[in-house]
Amino acid sequence: MRTLYPPIEPFDAFRMRVSPVHELYVEQAGNPQGTPVVFFHGGPGGGLDPMHRRYFDPARYRVVLFDQRGTGKSTPHACLDDNSTWHLVADAEALRERLGIERWHVFGGSWGSTLALAYAVTHAARVMSLTLRGVFLLRKAEIHWFYQEGASWIFPDAWERFVEPIPETERGDLLGAYYRRLTCGDAAIEGRCARAWSTWEGATSKLIPDDGLVQRCASDLFARQLARIEAHYFVNRGFFEKDGWLLDEARAKLGGTPLVMVQGRYDVVCPAKSAWDVKRALPHAELRLIPDAGHASSEVGIVDALVETTDRFARG
Ligand code: STX
């Protein structure tokens, strides 16, 4: 089994203004002369973690990572103005140009896979390869599964805590009910709902429940950015023009792009059907269905397959 590369500090970090409102935190790690890869974190609203640098051989890769709008060290925190899929795609492209990178590998898990696909279908010529984990196409059925009914049948205990802040009369549309509260302006209500929303995701992400992950998800700053930004993107259906748009575009645009998907069989957050649908749309794609893993990027079998994949792409 492959494991993560050792902890590493960035060799470069800077801030980049991308709109009158937003400034991004960007870092680079690994070999400045290495083959470039851009890392898209999850959520949306998850932000960077030092672990994200460790999926790439630091001798071979120049790893570019950034906190997406409103997350982590980017400012303003949890801000929903000028914050959409297409803003983030434009941010990645502006960053590529600023760094003088011609083409790069693209790596993303969960929402990061959604953003990776949105970037790739828009700028296919800039993408050397796609490595996707816990594939998420942000379709109506995927949102319904996780925030209305489906995952609730597998985690009824965690679900009871998720629905608790919402009165029974509003539970027919939990996403809508949460979105209204997460943006209501009352700090106590926003905070309580953010914690419940984020804890639901933390509790369902790993094959074997991980208290540490649940605690991280429950912390105030993390919960606020994750819950507000996710709810905003999901009520807006990912800012895609129609349901299933991303899959149709991938089929049309990515036939020539090397693509590997690493997917946990027991991923309850982003069920394997979406990766399967991408495989059906793009027969050249490689789908590695990990038999003993859930959603999280830290699952042992997921790490093994991801590191094997990035090692392979680094050799060209
Ligand atoms: N959100 C899927 C996603 O991108 C519906 C994601 N799942 N868990 C995470 O992100 C965190 C680990 C950032 C909580």
Image (cartoon, rainbow, N blue to C red):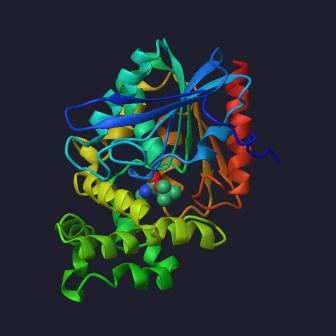
* Towards the viewer: 94 or 137: 94
- Tell me which corner region of the image, top left, top right, bottom left or bottom right, holds residue 194: bottom left
Tell me: residue 73, above or below residue 232: above
Q: Position of residue 227 (x, y in %)?
A: 35, 62
* Towards the viewer: 272 or 81: 81
Q: Position of residue 213 (x, y in %)?
A: 58, 66
* Towards the viewer: 107 or 24: 24
Q: Position of residue 216 (x, y in %)?
A: 53, 65
Quadrant of the rendering where the C terminus is positioned: top right
Residue positioned 46% across, 43% down in the render: 112
Please identify the residue farthest to the right as the structure is shown: 1
Residue positioned 54% across, 55% down in the render: 272
Residue positioned 43% across, 60% down in the render: 222
**Residue 236 shows up from this direction:** yes
Q: Position of residue 83 (x, y in %)?
A: 25, 43
Residue positioned 21% across, 38% down in the render: 21
In the drawing, does residue 175 fall left or right of residue 291? left
* Towards the viewer: 58 or 139: 58
**Residue 142 shows up from this direction:** no
- Tell me which corner region of the image, top left, top right, bottom left or bottom right, holds residue 163: bottom left
Please identify the residue farthest to the bottom as the structure is shown: 168
Tell me: residue 272, above or below residue 209: above
